[in-house]
Image (cartoon, grey):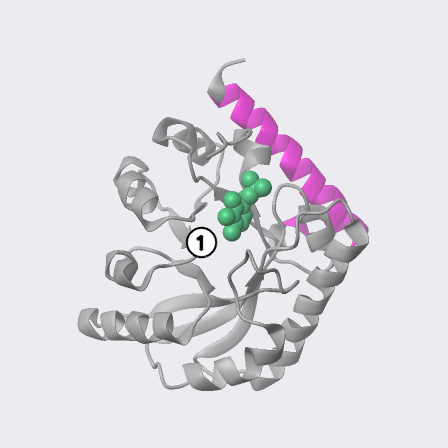
């Protein structure tokens, strides 16, 4: 099978699984946004996915996003899903649709400054280090309220939801517990809605755990390898 056919087949298998577990959870597949994670994937293969109807694409490095964005025509919503270096912020403002990895105040300050210069705003998700893993970015769930309070000073940032990465473990119960805890925060924060803080997006679930995430209320899943195949090991 050629690359394009393989991507198409992988994608339809993923979509079938999304529909099946959405159905079991009493939800609709159309309410779950699929972000195709294109890190390490070349433009030709990304365009094959876009041709299948995907238009939310996620990169975890600014450099890769910049290298690829002009090679992917069409109405694409780019998501930045990896930890951002503050000095790269200026390259993404005005270009990306959603920053999913807002994880510190120094980053918010620089985003706000750059948005001010460009006269624009940025939609962002707060990344939570849900299992308190040292290897992962994101703020502690217990610090979420004070983080949100501090973000109030940054008028060019709109908080649109929460994001997490579950631990890599075959323990599905543990993974579901992580997703369930994030969903509880998401629902709780809906009560504090303002123009600049609204809980619309709950981004959780990757190739190995998107079904658990859907059962626990995720409305945005980020899928790389299940669509494009395994990535080269760095
Ligand atoms: C790589 C990545 C994904 C996708 O991972 P897969 O296991 O390939 O689906 C999702 N979210 C983030 C933040 C990532 O870095």
Asked if residue 6 lies in the magenta stretch, the reply is yes
Look at the magenta stretch and give its main secondary structure: helix
The residue at the point 34 percent across, 60 percent down is 85
Asked if residue 110 is positioned above or below residue 23 in the image, the reply reads below
In this orientation, does residue 93 appear?
A: no
Q: Report x, y in % for residue 47.
A: 39, 31
Q: Is residue 233 left or right of residue 168?
A: left
Residue extent of the magenta highlight: 4-29
Residue neighbourhood size for the residue with mark 1, other residues' Cα within 10 Å, grouped as few (<14), some (14–19), many (≥20)? some
- The residue lying furthest to the top in this view is 1
Q: Report x, y in % for residue 4.
A: 48, 22
Q: Is residue 64 left or right of residue 46?
A: left
Q: Is residue 160 left or right of residue 133?
A: left
SS assignment at label 1: loop
- Viewer-nearest residue: 105 or 74: 105
Asked if residue 233 is positioned above or below residue 183 in the image, the reply reads above
Asked if residue 186 is positioned above or below residue 168 in the image, the reply reads below
Asked if residue 26 lies in the magenta stretch, the reply is yes
- The residue lying furthest to the left in this view is 117
Asked if residue 95 is positioned above or below residue 197 in the image, the reply reads above
The residue at the point 41 percent across, 60 percent down is 98
Q: Report x, y in % for residue 154.
A: 35, 81
Question: Is the CB atom of the residue marked by disc 1 within 8 angstroms of ligand 1's nearest atom?
Answer: yes
Q: Which residue is mark 1?
A: 82
Query: Ligand 1 is found in which quarter of the picture?
Result: top right
């Amino acid at each position: 099978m050629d690359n394009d056919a393989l991507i198409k087949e992988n994608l339809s298998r993923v979509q079938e699984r999304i529909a099946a577990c959405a159905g079991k959870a009493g939800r609709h597949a159309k309410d779950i946004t699929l972000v195709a994670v294109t890190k390490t994937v070349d433009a030709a293969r990304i365009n094959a996915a876009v041709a299948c109807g995907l238009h939310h694409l996620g990169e975890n490095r600014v450099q890769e996003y910049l290298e690829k964005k002009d090679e992917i025509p069409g109405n694409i919503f780019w998501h930045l899903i990896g930890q951002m270096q503050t000095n790269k912020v200026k390259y993404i403002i005005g270009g990306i649709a959603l920053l999913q990895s807002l994880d510190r105040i120094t980053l918010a300050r620089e985003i706000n400054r750059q948005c001010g210069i460009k006269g624009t705003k940025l939609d962002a998700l707060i990344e939570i280090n849900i299992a308190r893993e040292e290897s992962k970015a994101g703020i502690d769930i217990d610090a979420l309220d004070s983080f949100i309070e501090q973000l109030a000073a940054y008028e060019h940032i709109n908080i649109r939801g929460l994001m997490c990465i579950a631990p890599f473990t075959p323990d599905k119960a543990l993974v579901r517990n992580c997703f369930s805890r994030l969903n509880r925060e998401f629902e709780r924060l809906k009560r504090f809605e303002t123009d600049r803080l609204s809980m619309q997006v709950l981004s959780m679930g990757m190739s190995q755990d998107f079904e658990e995430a859907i059962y626990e209320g995720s409305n945005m899943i980020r899928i790389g390898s299940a669509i494009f195949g395994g990535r080269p090991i760095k």
